[in-house]
Amino acid sequence: MVHSSTLPGRLFRAANAFFLLALALLCLFPLVNVLAVSFSSSTAASAGMVKLWPVGFNLASYRFVLQKPEFMRALFISLERVSLGTAVNMLLTVTLAYPLAKESVKFRGRTFYVWFFVLTMLVSGGLIPWYMVIKSAGLLDSIWALILPGAVNVYNAVLLLNFFRGLPKELEEAAFVDGAGHWTILWRIFVPLSMPALATLILFTMVGHWNSWFDGMILMNTPEHYPLQSYLQTVVISHDLSLVTMSDASSLAEVSDRTMKSAQIFLAALPILCVYPFLQRFFIKGVVLGSVKE
């Protein structure tokens, strides 16, 4: 990239850098505040004394939360949902996008199937029919009720098929000449070359499963089967303390309602914060560049 060395160019770059830095700090401020409150004493948090740094540093809130079997059970359910859901979603997305990325000459029914799937993005069956189908399938109160209804994400499939269509056709033709079939071409050529797109879709899918709470509320018959976000919605947002057992009463003297909520919110965000750096390196282009020489 060529940068202008003139005074207006330098001023623009400086203003742009300042604006982006301010925007980044603005986005980080709520998370830093939540983290600071979670490490602060109950008195300081209740008095509103905590801003960006803990006041009266202690780990009482985290000890209280991590000792709660309800929180840990909800955490493991969410981890199970993300693991199974991401695997199912990506497998179906890849296998759906590959045939739809072909030209109509090679796949005569492509146009019909494309419009069929696009129609599902525009028209919804409604909440009640959706619930009745899941109930009739016997999926209520099971982990599969959180995974199978949204197993095929059409939006992700459209993004991936457009990425597949942009790959050099010479690679596929050369593979066919060497005797490779569609299955081999998909997993040996298309998938490795599509890692930036796949990493992006994997991240979106993981975040979608991790942050989803509404389906857990209506598809799980008992709170013991709630995923983490549904549990947090019940305890943190709705202030339903029925999930707080009597054995927690002695620990409540060391923590406040605000520090306990902040600790749970930060622990709920921590897994995604740990996963993102490993996927960030795929958010680059250039994987296909050079694969076919002119």
Image: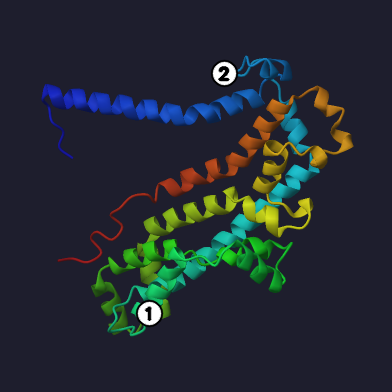
Crowding at mark 1 (Cα within 10 Å: few <14, some 14-19, many 20+): few
Q: Which residue is mark 2?
A: 51
Between 61 and 240, the one lying in front of the other is: 240
Q: Give residue 97's position: percent from left, percent from top.
A: 40, 70
Crowding at mark 2 (Cα within 10 Å: few <14, some 14-19, many 20+): some
Is residue 154 rendered to the left or right of residue 271?
A: left
Q: Give residue 174's position: percent from left, percent from top.
A: 27, 78
Between 43 and 123, the one lying in front of the other is: 123
The number of callouts visible is 2
Splitting the image into 4 quarters, where does residue 69 fall?
top right
Task: Pick the quarter of the image with the N terminus.
Answer: top left
Q: Give residue 196's position: percent from left, percent from top.
A: 38, 55
User: Which label sits on residue 13?
Assistant: none
Q: Is residue 250 above or below residue 170?
A: above
Residue 146 in view here: yes
- Residue at 32%, 77% (x, y): give it: 102
Query: In the rendered structure, which disc, 2 or 1, sits on the residue that comes first in sequence?
Result: 2
Splitting the image into 4 quarters, where does residue 241 fall?
top right
Q: Is residue 195 above or below residue 67?
A: below
CB under 8 Å between callouts 2 and 1?
no
Is residue 106 rendered to the left or right of residue 258?
A: left
Q: Which residue is mark 1?
A: 112
**What kind of residue is marked 1?**
Phe
Between 266 and 113, the one lying in front of the other is: 113
